[in-house]
Image: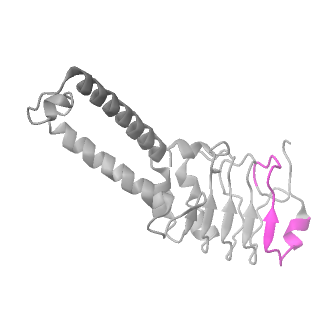
Amino acid sequence: KENIRLTSALERCVNLKTLDLSQNGLRDLLVDYKRIDSMAKLKFLDLKQNRLKNLDSLPTCERLEILHLEGNLIANVRELEILQTRAPQLKQLYLENSSANLRNPLCRTKHYSELIVKMLPGLTVLNGMRLNYEYSLYNLGKSIEKAFCKNEEEEKGDDDSRTSPASRSSGVELCPELEAGLDEDVDKLESLLASCKKLVKQQ
């Protein structure tokens, strides 16, 4: 679908609470090339899998709580600042799905989720992850990344941090077979930690 345009009938739907415009190839939300001023009662808006690069054409939605934008072309976090005034009651924002096959280019920005949370402090859910729950995936990821950063700082201050397990074992000598086994286990652990760190940075 290309260059789909919204019709003027949408302006007359003043009592609309739920609107699904997903998968329509929309480049904007203009009606007759003009922005709809307000959709005051709208609470749920699904715009996923369109071709939106920004939200400049979004009507003012005073009661909007849930907004789906997965699979669009929004490349900069700053394009979402407009939600502060156009959707002041927004609680749930979706920019990518759980499998990350529907996402916006901005989702490749390092720590983009933290930037959005600071920009939109009223959010309670981002990409399906609860933000105000101590043990949510979002907060767990932040805790893991913080631990990684702390570990990296400690390793930088230790010139011998990359020596073999045997040489870090208070001078205890190990048989070659046991030392080789420990080296293999350490390699597996470091590989697992690296994978976890990569996963966290994608959030």
Residue 74 or residue 48, whichever sits in front: 48
Instruction: Answer above or below: position of 178 versus 203.
Output: above
The residue lying furthest to the left in this view is 171
Residue 160 visible at all: no
Side of 178 relative to 45 (left or right): left
Is 23 part of what is drawn in magenta? Answer: yes
Residue 71 or residue 9, whichever sits in front: 71
Q: Write the start and end of the magenta stretch as one range.
A: 9-28
Query: Which quarter of the figure has residue 1?
Result: top right
Instruction: Answer above or below: position of 15 versus 145.
Output: below
- Count of numbered marks: 0
Instruction: Answer above or below: position of 79 versus 18.
Output: above
Q: Residue 193, image x and y in percent?
A: 38, 40
Residue 153 visible at all: yes
Q: Residue 62, image x and y in percent?
A: 67, 76
Magenta stretch, overall SS: loop
Is 140 part of what is drawn in magenta? Answer: no
Q: Residue at x 63, y 47 (%)?
A: 74
Residue 161 or residue 21, whichever sits in front: 161
Q: Residue 134, image x and y in percent?
A: 44, 68
Instruction: Answer above or below: position of 155 versus 56.
Output: above
Q: Residue 80, image x and y in percent?
A: 58, 57
Query: Which quarter of the figure has residue 8?
Result: bottom right
